[in-house]
């Protein structure tokens, strides 16, 4: 599935929906992250390395690594959701495999299983230095599709 | 164990070590987070609510919630580590239980099992509104104690 | 919540529903496990130590530890579900903290958050030797409440 | 990495070490599981479907699914460990994606990152019916390489 989706581009309506939602994520803007790829079931987010995202040894903080991984997986799921729904992260698990270094990180969220209510994504984060990519984190995430209440757009109903 | 540690204060040497390390975490400063409690095996971190840490619905982003939870657990473990060591997050898993709202979030990291090499922490994050606390996320984290190489202080050795 | 539920007994209807379901779990019978406590939001399962449940060093296998933890959490959630529903494990994560030894293991599943669709449980497994209990595993689990299709009782609908 | 390892066979010494250890796992024998593939960094385990491994709806129990996934990942890591070491599962997380049905399940453990102390594996479990394979569970696992104490072979030291 991944190969197929990597080669596709998402339709313009889906891409617009993802970009609009992403721009409302104050955290992504504050961290300096941006969307670098949107395809059906697969979204990439790039985070440039800078002092504002580091931990105590100067590497990128696991919290920043996780934040872009979580958003990449959430939007990967969201590309496959019907209209008038929103996406909630139910949970995720992430292993930090190597120090998060590089000019930037790239998080890749890929849908493994799309269900009516729940979707499961694979999360990968790469450290990119020059042309060299190193897998620095890998994770697994569960997401929920929630119907938006028309009276309060964007307000997810309770789980 | 939790009750005991909650009532204790960490010794001044340990507290200084934690505060020095925390101040080097560019991400925590950038998010506006601060340490609110340091005890042996238990550390709290507070994150005030503001637009820079939100997701698309205006709640606090799971990535910000996770970042303070990860740091709280890491420092909880670090309070119990011997001198000349540093702490690495191996992995964590977090469930988002409720929308992350409130005047601020408070992350609580508590050591469940301290080992020579690996330590396991419980992670809890509360949304605090006025005097009311709601559990909004719960997780579990594995950390590693690594000896610092004296020639490069603060540089963790490979896993 | 835990203290409250520990002191309560589940109503006879709920207890009967749990026991009937447990008896249909071929794996629990094959492993030699039994229900030892059923309360609203909290279920315990006991697994006696014997050669049929070991790993290569003679300790109880992580798979057996996980199996009783998963069932304890699933039934803890099920105690709170409405009639004509069934319970599915969406995912769980477990840390093995110490060698699984003792006369028997006791798994404790406790509901942390009960939602309409999703429920999150804490999982704990203790090794019990004489009167001494040691925490040997701790985990976190997400469960789903699914409506049973009347034409095929017990058949969960797809996620 | 996976493709490479899939095509290789493990050396006879490594294969013998894995088979000897597997045969000492009372649980695998009791469940009726067997090793079906051993390559460097990749091990498969097959579990035939039968009433002794079911949950309450007649599907294979998540505990049995997890048990073979945990063992497959543990042995995948073990193929890469030096002599006179043993393998401990630190933790794992698993998502159950679809009902566990089929003539048999096949668990595939694949090393994602091999470290000196810690190794991270991907876990996949397929339901196999005739020639048709369906991914029914996916997970991620952390393992530890522990030196065996010569006086008590097979006895892992504490974490």
Image (tube, coloured by chain):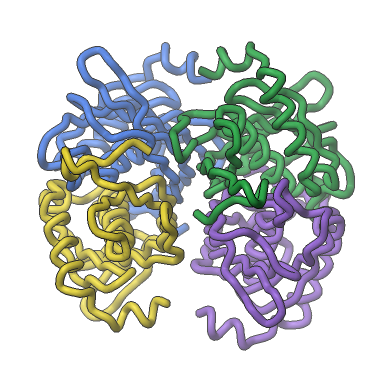
Chain colours: A blue, B yellow, C purple, D green
Picture quarter containing residue A35?
top left
Residue reaching furthest to the right: D51
Seen at 16% across and 31% down, the residue is A49
Nearer the observer, A10 or B133 = B133
- Position of residue A14 measured from the top left corner of the image (x, y, whole percent): 36, 27
| Badge count | 0
| A153 vs A119: above or below | below
Left or right: where D57 falls relative to B96: right
> Can residue A99 be seen from the camera position used here?
yes
- Position of residue D101 measured from the top left corner of the image (x, y, whole percent): 78, 37
- Position of residue D91 measured from the top left corner of the image (x, y, whole percent): 53, 49
Seen at 49% across and 29% down, the residue is D112
Nearer the observer, A144 or C9 = C9
| A152 vs B129: above or below | above
Seen at 75% across and 49% down, the residue is D61
Nearer the observer, D1 or C151 = D1
């Amino acid at each position: 599935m991944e190969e197929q989706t990597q080669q596709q581009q998402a339709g313009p309506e889906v891409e617009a929906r993802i970009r609009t939602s992403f721009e409302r994520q104050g955290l992504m803007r504050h961290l300096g992250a941006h969307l670098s790829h949107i395809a059906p079931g697969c979204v990439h987010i790039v985070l440039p390395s800078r002092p504002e995202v580091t931990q105590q040894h100067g590497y990128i903080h696991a919290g920043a690594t996780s934040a872009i991984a979580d958003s990449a997986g959430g939007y990967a799921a969201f590309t496959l959701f019907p209209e008038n729904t929103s996406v909630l992260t139910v949970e995720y698990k992430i292993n930090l495999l190597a120090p998060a270094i590089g000019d930037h990180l790239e998080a890749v969220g890929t849908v493994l299983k799309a269900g009516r209510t729940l979707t499961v994504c694979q999360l990968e984060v790469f450290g990119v230095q020059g042309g060299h990519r190193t897998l620095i984190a890998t994770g697994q995430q569960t997401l929920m599709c929630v119907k938006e209440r028309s009276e309060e757009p964007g307000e997810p109903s309770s789980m």
